[in-house]
Image (cartoon, helix red, strand yellow):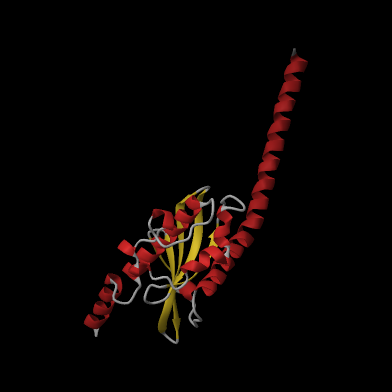
Amino acid sequence: MAKLDSSLRNMILSLLFISMGMSAALGFVYNMTKEPIEAANKAKEVNAVKDVLPPFNNDPTTEVKTIDNLVFYPATMDGKPIGCAVKTYTEKGYSGRFDLMVGFQPDGKINNIVVLEQKETPGLGTKMKEPKFKDQFNLMDIGSLQNKELKVKKDGGTVDAISAATISSRAFCDGVQKAYNLYMKNFAPGSPAVSDTTMTKGDKQ
């Protein structure tokens, strides 16, 4: 009986040491890969900002602002605003959340859109990355649409949905709409936030 207890004790201790060793190894691998992964994701976002906006010569990443979980990158050319890139998202995708980078011109027209992360169905929802779908948004003025709402044609809107992927198409519109609404409220010329900032600067002079 004593021999059995000793063997059981040794087995438990062995399993404990193995578990501790594996945990330490996993922690080491995580710490080694964490920074490179974060750096790669950051570089991807910076490149997306360049892709969705006209040429600029400031560094939007140093002027970044986060509003309601959306990230805004204001861009200027020689100090003059030329637009803003917005990292937006939707939770309404067929496979859940996906992230977009939407570039707006100063007047709110869409300049370009880049898909950052998505897990939609291959060959269906993933077609949101293709020019045939996403480029139809370029130069679109959401403010001129009925009720200022972006919708697929099936819902009475103007957007051509991806064939057999209406849910993904609707979700794409949802993410862009979020970005548009907050951009117009906080960054577009004449918006309440910009007007308040201008008045505050004037009061200080």
Measured as percent of width and height from the top left, residue 11 is found at 73, 26
Q: Nearer the viewer, residue 72 or 114?
A: 114
Which residue of the protein is positioned furthest toward the left in this rendering? 203
| Image-quadrant location for residue 128 | bottom right
Q: Residue at 55% of width from left, 65% of height from top?
A: 132
Mark yes or no: residue 87 visible: yes
Spot occupied by residue 24 in the image (x, y as percentages of width and height): 67, 45
Residue at horizontal 44 percent and vertical 81 percent from the top: 76
Among the 4 quarters of the image, the one containing residue 173: bottom left
Horizontal arrangement in the rendering, residue 79 relative to residue 6 (left or right): left
| Closer-to-camera residue (58/97) | 97
Left or right: where 9 falls relative to 45: right
- Judge left or right: residue 72 versus residue 198: right
Q: Nearer the viewer, residue 60 or 102?
A: 102
Residue at coordinates 70% horizontally, 41% vertically from top-left?
Answer: 21
In this rendering, does residue 113 appear at all?
Answer: no
| Camera-side residue of 121 and 66 | 121
Q: Does 134 sit left or right of 182 as displayed? A: right
In this view, 146 is above or below 109: above
- Write the residue at 25% across / 77% down: 200
Q: How many marks?
A: 0
Residue at the farthest right position: 3
Residue, far top: 1
**Residue 175 at x, y percent in the picture:** 44, 59
Quadrant including the C terminus: bottom left
Residue 7 at x, y percent in the picture: 76, 22
Q: Quadrant of residue 72?
A: bottom left
Quadrant where the N terminus sits is top right
Image vertical order of residue 85 relative to residue 77, above or below: above
